[in-house]
Amino acid sequence: MHFRPLVLAPLAGILAAASEPALLFFRNEQKKYGYLDLEGRVVIEAKYENTFGFREGLAPVQFGGKYGYIDRTGRMVIEPRFEFASVFDEGMAPVKLNGKFGFIDRTGRVVIEPIYEAAERFSEGLAAVKLNGKVGFVDRTGKMVIEPRYEKATPFSGGASQAHRDSRYIWLRFEWQYALGSVIALIHDIFITIGVFAIFQLKFDLTTVAAVLTIIGYSVNDSIVIFDRIRETSRREPTLVMKDVINKSINQTLSRTLLTSLTVLFVVVILFIFGGSVIQDFALALIVGVIVGTYSSVFIASPIVLYWEKGARGKSKG
């Protein structure tokens, strides 16, 4: 049987593999979808017309033109009766029934009636829904907490919006110089990781994209720790010049940065060596990303903040 791996479960699922081994879905030559484990063994036969991967122990699958949900053993726990179904988040999933979108719980019971033209997954207790051509937000009871008045709205989750969300958070929490330093460091991390794959002619698929998104989150988190210490030090010791503030802050957070990076690096190296060919590219991207993400937070993001701080002060003096 020939198949092509499509999606790898998130890193958190891999690290928790003792209880719930990560599963990938694949499509065979007959364009049917099934699931395999990290060693390449087929655990759920390819018989579905579509699927979106497991989340919270269940995966939506299309069977006979309708969508239902299977568990990790392949048992159909919610019978196919929906025109469309997405993955679960926070115990609820958006589904399409009779041409409208609503929400079901993990038992398949409809908990928010299908009255919407479109619906997104829940994130932080809210879900974006479209009603009468406008987008608003409902809570888990179905109450419209933000009235539909927007042309487009998206919950904070995944995809290309990750870097934008993280830089916006830094901008709001700190100052625009910090956001700029973080974004430039992120671009550096992504280009280095992709460059390694380009130089060695390695396969770049959706598993690698998942690794790149993980690297983005990891790198931004490192930058936030340093930036937060810079802000605390500058308030606590206002007589220090910015260069000394940044230097002192980096030294204070260096042990935490190195311990975190080495711990993560140890895990992904083990995955690279013992995880098998299915996960090697994913682990390699994380190895490169952890290394470059660690030094970019210290040697790229922080100096850029210093450079712009000096420029802003120079202009104010002029």
Image: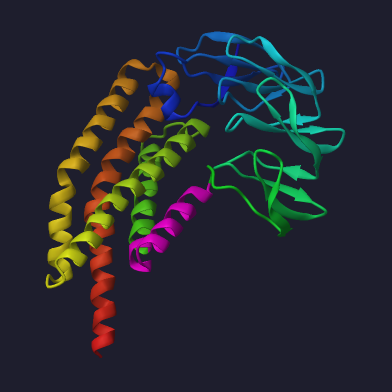
Predominant SS of the magenta segment: helix
Q: Nearer the viewer, residue 263 or 239?
A: 239
Q: Quadrant of residue 99?
A: top right
For the N terminus, the quadrant is top right
Camera-side residue of 88 and 53: 88
Whether residue 79 sits left or right of residue 12 in the image: it is right
Quadrant that contains the C terminus:
bottom left
Left or right: residue 157 versus residue 13 is right
Is residue 36 visible to us here?
Answer: yes
Q: In percent of the image, x 25 and y 70: which residue is there? A: 307
The correct choice, above or below, for 286 with respect to 225 in the image is above
**Whether residue 87 can be seen here:** no
Q: Residue at x 30, y 52 (%)?
A: 223
Q: Residue furthest bottom?
A: 318
Which residue range is magenta in the image? Answer: 160-179
Image vertical order of residue 150 relative to residue 120, above or below: below
Q: Position of residue 34 (x, y in %)?
A: 63, 16
Q: Quadrant of residue 247?
A: bottom left
Nearest the eye: 38 or 171? 171
Left or right: 81 as drawn, with respect to 294: right
Q: What percent of the width, then of the height, locates residue 300?
A: 26, 57
Residue 162: in magenta span: yes
Q: How did the renderer colour the structure?
A: rainbow
Residue 286 rendering spot, x and y as whole percentages: 35, 34
| Rendered residue at 70%/24% (across/down) | 50
